[in-house]
Amino acid sequence: MYIDAVLLIAIAIILYSIYKKISKMLTLLENESRVLYPENDADNRFKVKDWLRLIYYRSNAAMYSLENIDYALNYDNPAGGNSAPAKRIRNLINLYAEYLIKTEQLSQSEAEARAVFEFSEFDIRELVKKINDSSSGRNWKKIGQFFVTGLLEKDCAIQAQTLIPHDIFAPIWDLFKKQMYVKNKECPVRIEAYENSYKDYVKNRSIVLKLLDLGIIAKVEPKRPDAYWLGDPTFRFRIDDLEEIRSIIYMGGSFHDDAFFESRYNEGSLDRVFRCSNFP
């Protein structure tokens, strides 16, 4: 009984709120009508139904204009083969032909002919889905071709010349101090940084190569025989004392102390580069 009473009160409050909103709207319409039409012209004054009709017609006109704009933007315009829709279809046909060559072992001419036929006769969305599904994974063959060129090692060697001790030591300090790396633990470490560009990619690997040259770390060879180590460098620390590592990197000279790195960490300006593989 008590719950029913509360529910009725709540409904009454909601209805009253709706009534107040409608009443306010009608008052505004009435005031607007008085502005447009003087008191002595009451017969010609807009009524509520007139305002609603006007709103309906204006909304309809706006919708019609938007439909026309959409139609114009997506219309197969007279530019023929140079129109945007034509270029899109042509590119999709080329991609689908490549897909058929890989999956159906067709020749180039056979794949192109079938791609044109399928795009003319069948649902384009399903064909695009096939292309997307086939290209969702990374193309490991092409990636491997880049690695064997030696270009990455060359770029890393150039980048290593610009590194300062802070660049090399900061990610290690973060690993030992903020990720609680456990000394003497057989825990492989790898790059876990967010790399938004090739420049970032090269810099992080140049840090790893510098640590390798200094004898601070040792490679952990990849399990897959065809894997390229520098693509996903994994390593263990040969020296696991942070102060000794600091001394080697700064060559026994002046160095940035813990307070310096702590302040950078608190500011959010200390980028995370390394992460222990066994950490969550």
Image (cartoon, grey):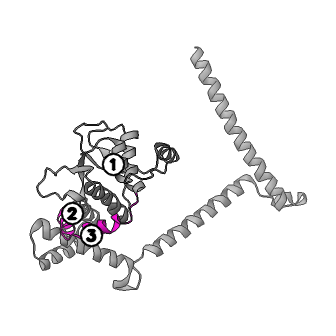
Percent coordinates x, y for residue 253 in the rendering: 42, 53
Residue 137 visible within the image = no
Q: Report the magenta stretch's main SS.
A: helix
On residue 16, the disc is: none
Image point 89% across, 57% down: which residue? 39
Percent coordinates x, y for residue 169 in the rendering: 38, 51
**Residue, disc 2:** 139
Callout 3 amino acid: Lys
| Res 14 quadrant in image | top right
Callout 1 amino acid: Phe
Residue 108 on the magenta span: no
Image point 75% across, 48% down: which residue? 26
Q: Is residue 235 above or below residue 129?
A: above
Element carrying mark 3 = helix
Residue 166 visible within the image = yes
Percent coordinates x, y for residue 239 in the rendering: 27, 44
